Image: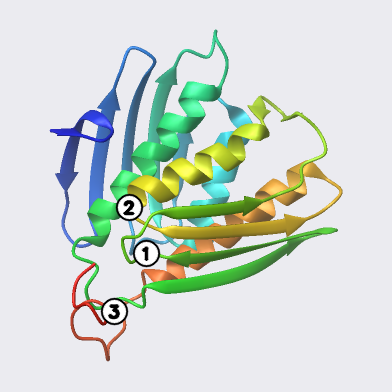
């Protein structure tokens, strides 16, 4: 299948589960997501701190997540971080299906020691991102912190989500982790079934 991501392979599973794979000359990425999971994460991107953040996202979002990525890390971490986020967003979009019968909106605020972050999410199909995470350093472990904003933008674009993430903190590790935990909890709320909702949560009647 050829999409805005280039050539990808999408496989829908039972329930709200999907697998998306994407291969380019820079990266080879496979993501499987189950929105109705238990928070089980098995993530291997080659960028250790990114693995940690994505694992926290899944754990607190109560979604099962498997990610396998091989990228040109001999260049830097940019392509790997971006492409994993793109494929993750595409997998979540596929798992959401027609987005009917869900809450659509979710928000969460998560503290981690001196840091606190808030994520506000609309999975109604309108991609837009605002990120304000004032990191102090350049890297946390092997992850270039500047790429976190880029990853969140890529994720929202392919997920079809409006995403606002803001936070404060003196420790970059704490601030980044609080942001990904908040994103997981916000997605959990937005994707939750709404027993009173018929169709999509939009006055337009479509996403």
Labels 2 and 1 touching (C-beta < 8 A): yes
Q: Which mark is residue 201?
A: 3
Q: Residues within 10 Å of mark 2 (few under 14, many from 20)?
A: many
Q: Is residue 83 left or right of residue 96?
A: right
The percent coordinates of residue 71 (x first, y second) are 44, 17
Pick out the residue farthest to the left.
1
- Work out whether 2 lies above or below 16: above
Q: Which mark is residue 111?
A: none
Mark 2, residue position: 92
- The image quadrant where one finds the N terminus is top left
Labels 3 and 1 touching (C-beta < 8 A): no
Residue at image coords 36%, 73%:
104
Which of discs 2 and 1 lies nearer the camera? The answer is 1
Mark 1, residue position: 123
The percent coordinates of residue 57 (x first, y second) are 53, 53
Of mark 3 and mark 1, the one earlier in the sequence is 1
Res 46 visible:
no
Residue at image coords 59%, 70%:
108
Which of discs 3 and 2 lies nearer the camera? The answer is 3
Helix, strand or loop at mark 2? helix
Res 161 visible:
yes
- Residue 15's image quarter? bottom left
Helix, strand or loop at mark 3? loop
């Amino acid at each position: 299948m050829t999409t805005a991501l280039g050539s990808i392979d999408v496989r829908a599973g039972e329930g709200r589960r999907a697998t998306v794979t994407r291969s380019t000359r820079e990266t080879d990425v496979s993501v499987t997501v189950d929105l109705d999971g238990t928070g089980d994460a098995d993530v291997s991107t080659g960028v250790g701190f990114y693995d940690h953040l994505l694992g926290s996202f899944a754990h607190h979002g109560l979604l099962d997540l498997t990610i396998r990525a091989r990228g040109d890390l001999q260049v830097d971490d940019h392509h790997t971080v971006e492409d994993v986020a793109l494929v993750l967003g595409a997998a979540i979009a596929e798992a959401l299906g027609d987005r009917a019968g869900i809450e659509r909106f979710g928000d969460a605020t998560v503290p981690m020691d001196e840091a606190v972050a808030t994520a506000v999410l609309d999975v109604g199909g309108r991609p837009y991102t605002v990120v304000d995470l004032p990191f102090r350093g350049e890297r946390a472990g092997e992850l270039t912190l500047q790429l976190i904003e880029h990853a969140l933008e890529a994720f929202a674009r392919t997920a079809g989500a409006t995403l606002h993430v803001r936070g404060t903190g003196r420790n970059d590790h704490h601030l980044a982790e609080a942001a990904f935990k908040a994103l997981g909890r916000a997605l959990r709320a937005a994707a939750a079934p709404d027993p009173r909702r018929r169709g999509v949560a939009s006055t337009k009647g479509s996403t």
